[in-house]
Each structure stands twice: as C-alpha cells, then as structure tokens.
Amino acid sequence: MTNEQIAQDLVAQFGEDNIFGIVENYGLLNVTTTTDTIVPLMHYLYQHPTFKFQFLTDLGGIHFPDVPSHEFGVIYHLHSLENNVRLIIKLYVSRENIVVPTITGLYACANWMEREAFDFYGILFSGHPKMERILNAEDMDYHPMRKEYPLEDATRQDKIDALFGR
C-alpha cells in the first residue's frame, strides 16, 4: 500500500472537490478536505478493509490570520497500526464560521483533543459531548494560541536590549 494508492482511492471515493491539496512531506501523505466530508472520510478510512486507519495519533488546531476564508484549520494525524502507514488530513474554516464536525463518535480520544483545539483556538466542534475548556481557566474570554496577540508585553522593562549589551 503506497501513498499514491491511498490518494487515488480517496479521490475516487470522495471526488476532487472533497479531496485536494495532495502532497507528500517526508514520506507522509497529506490531504486536505472539507467540513462536510471529514466525518464520512474518517469513517471510510477507519472501516476500509486494507487501509485500517484506526488510530488517531493527534488532532490540533492552527491559525493563519492572513489567509482569507481559511484562517483556522484542524489537522488530523491518523495511523494504520496494521500497515504501519501514517496519514495527515487537513481542513480549513473561515473566521466567520469556526465550526467543524466532531469525530468523537469514531475516535473516543478525539474528545480531549477537540476540547484542547477549542480552548486554545476557539474552534467549535459541533456534536461534541462536552465542548468546554480543558486546560485554561473557564472564565477566560479569549483563546491564547490565536495569532492576534503580541508575543511579548511591550511594557516589560527586563527585556530592554541595553540590558543584554545590544
């Protein structure tokens, strides 16, 4: 089973409108999909008689504030333990509608990963059983990993270049 075979199978099953941005980085197949396709795609990969992507290694959020209509994204890392093959699936959503369907019905471990993506990026997972903060304080009114905050406090006096001989 090669990355090319997997990519061709996914395009044949879901179409080029739903499986696109196919690249291979460091031997890992990367595909991009849509929010409408992510749940059926995950079920297909999980139940496929050959692929058997039955382990969700990781799920994380990302923020690209300078990319119109694709400011937020979710990255899924799948692993077929039986075939020792990994697959990365990406999807992007706009700032106006930061909602992605949950995959907790298929991968129970997605529960905490989706909550973390919500906590840090504000990505909502529709259908999630308990969409609330997991690491930050419940009364926080912002999402700290978004790239809309300065990296450092400009008023700090201990970071002045003169103190470091610059």
Image: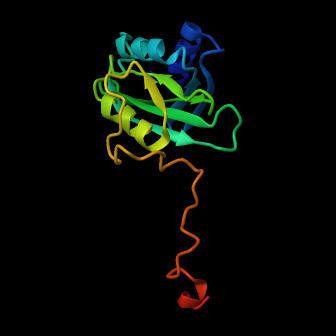
- Residue shown at 59% from the left, 30% from the top: 92
Count of marks, rendered view: 0
Regarding residue 69, the answer to whether it shows in the image is yes
> Which of the 4 image quarters holds residue 43?
top left
161 lies above or below 30 = below
67 lies above or below 101 = below
Q: Where residue 58 sits in the image (x, y, percent)?
A: 38, 36
41 lies above or below 145 = above
Left or right relative to 21: residue 73? left
- Residue shown at 50% from the left, 37% from the top: 27
What colouring style does the render use?
rainbow
- Residue shown at 50% from the left, 33% from the top: 74
Left or right relative to 44: residue 31? right
Q: Where residue 22 sits in the image (x, y, percent)?
A: 61, 27
**Quadrant occupied by the C terminus:** bottom right
- Residue shown at 65% from the left, 33% from the top: 70
Regarding residue 80, the answer to whether it shows in the image is no
108 lies above or below 14 = below
**Quadrant occupied by the N terminus:** top left
> Which of the 4 image quarters holds residue 103?
top left
Q: Where residue 112 sits in the image (x, y, percent)?
A: 31, 34
